[in-house]
Image: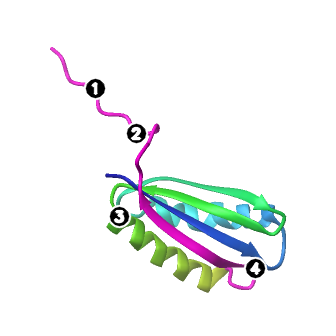
Amino acid sequence: MRCTRVALYDIKTGTFEEVVSQAKSGMVPLFKDSNGFVSYGVAQVDKDAFVSISTWETRAQADAATAKAADWVKANSRDRFTLRDNYVGDLAIDTGHREPMPITH
C-alpha cells in the first residue's frame, strides 16, 4: 500500500517563493533519486507556514524520506524554516494510482 508523508514547516526568514526555489533545487532531486518515490508537492498554508506532501510506495520508504528531509533541512535551510509536525500514513484513497492495463494480444 502506498504511503504519504505530510510535513508542516514554519518559515523563519524569507518568503514562501524562496522556500519553493530551495525545494526545487534541493528536495526535488533528493526525493526523485530515492527508492519508492511517487510524487512530491509543497503548498503554502499560512503567511509563515507551508506543507510538504510526498507519496511513496511503502511506509519504510516514507519513513526514510522523513530522515532524508530532516538531514537536508538541517544542512541547508534550518535558518530559513523549521519542522513543526511530521505525519506518515497509509493512503486509503489514492486517485493518482492507476493499475496497469492488462496486456492483450
Question: Which of the two discs, 4 and 2, labels the residue nearer the N terminus?
Answer: 4
Hey, what amino acid is under mark 1? Met
Q: Nearer the viewer, mark 3 or mark 1?
A: 3
Q: Residue at x 75, y 79 (%)?
A: 80
Q: Is residue 103 magenta?
A: yes
Q: Nearer the viewer, mark 4 or mark 3?
A: 3
Q: Nearer the viewer, mark 4 or mark 2?
A: 2
| Residue receiving disc 3 | 59
99 over 49 or under it: above or below: above
Query: Helix, strand, or loop for circle 2?
Result: loop
Magenta span of residues: 77-105
Residue 5, how many percent across, how many down? 49, 63
Where, quadrant-wise, is the C terminus in this rendering? top left
Quarter of the image where one finds residue 93? top left
Task: Point out the residue furthest to the left here.
Answer: 105
Q: Quick check: marks 4 and 2 in contact, CB under 8 Å?
A: no
The answer for how far apart the CA atoms under marks 3 and 1 are is: 25 Å
Mark linked to residue 97:
2
The answer for how far apart the CA atoms under marks 1 and 2 are is: 12 Å
Hey, what amino acid is under mark 4? Arg
| Residue receiving disc 4 | 80
Q: Nearer the viewer, residue 40 or 10?
A: 10
Q: Main secondary structure of the magenta part?
A: loop
Q: Residue at x 58, y 68 (%)?
A: 7
Question: Which of the two discs, 3 and 1, labels the residue nearer the N terminus?
Answer: 3
Question: Which of the two discs, 4 and 3, labels the residue nearer the N terminus?
Answer: 3
| Residue receiving disc 1 | 101
Query: Helix, strand, or loop for circle 4?
Result: loop
Residue 60 located left or right of residue 62: left
- Pointer 4 local density, CA inside 10 Å: few below 14, some 14–19, many at least 20: some
